[in-house]
Image: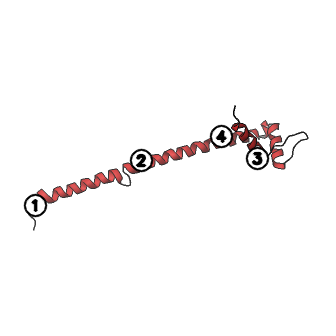
Amino acid sequence: MLSKQFILSVVLPSLLVCWAATIIYSAVAGRSGYAALAHLEAEVETKTTEVDLLTARREALQQRADQLNSKSLDPDLVDERIRSVLGYSREGDVVVSRQALDDALRNRSNKPK
């Protein structure tokens, strides 16, 4: 049998050191430790950015919906939507394709001033 002196001088301090090491490891690298906190803070920052983008998109859609409201209908917006959906243009309208517009803008920005 182990003597009382051996237990108090060797076993008990060893157990306390192991317990303290486990607590310190959990505080730093455990599921709810400092490393997990840093990961969660990064995730919160990412989600905050995502929420800001979605909020801006919602506000833009809300503004567009307000313009399409029958009480405050913008005739220019209605005309634009009809033309884009049906593919119509008025006589005398100049139609520029997206590719031609992109090429013109690219050539304009590449010219020295």
* Pair 2/4: label in front: 2
Reading the image, the residue beneath label 4 is 59
Reading the image, the residue beneath label 2 is 38
* Pair 1/2: label in front: 2
Numbered disc 4: secondary structure: helix
Disc 3/disc 1 C-alpha distance (Å): 87 Å
Placement of 73 over or under 87, stated as above or below = above
In the rendered view, does 15 fall on the left or right side of 2? right
Query: Of marks 3 and 4, which one's residue comes earlier in the chain?
Result: 4
Reading the image, the residue beneath label 3 is 99
Query: Of marks 4 and 1, which one's residue comes earlier in the chain?
Result: 1
Q: Quadrant of residue 69?
A: top right
Query: Of marks 3 and 1, which one's residue comes earlier in the chain?
Result: 1
* Pair 3/4: label in front: 3
Tell me which amino acid carries mark 3. Answer: Gln
Numbered disc 1: secondary structure: helix
Disc 3/disc 4 C-alpha distance (Å): 30 Å
In the orientation shown, which residue stands out farthest toward the top?
A: 113
Tell me which amino acid carries mark 1. Answer: Phe
**Residue 109 x/y as whole percent:** 70, 37
Numbered disc 3: secondary structure: helix
In the rendered view, does 107 fall on the left or right side of 30? right
**Residue 96 x/y as whole percent:** 81, 43
Query: Of marks 2 and 4, which one's residue comes earlier in the chain?
Result: 2
**Residue 92 x/y as whole percent:** 90, 39
Tell me which amino acid carries mark 4. Answer: Glu
Other residues around mark 3 within 10 Å, as few (<14) / some (14–19) / many (≥20): few
Residue found at x 33% / y 50% = 27
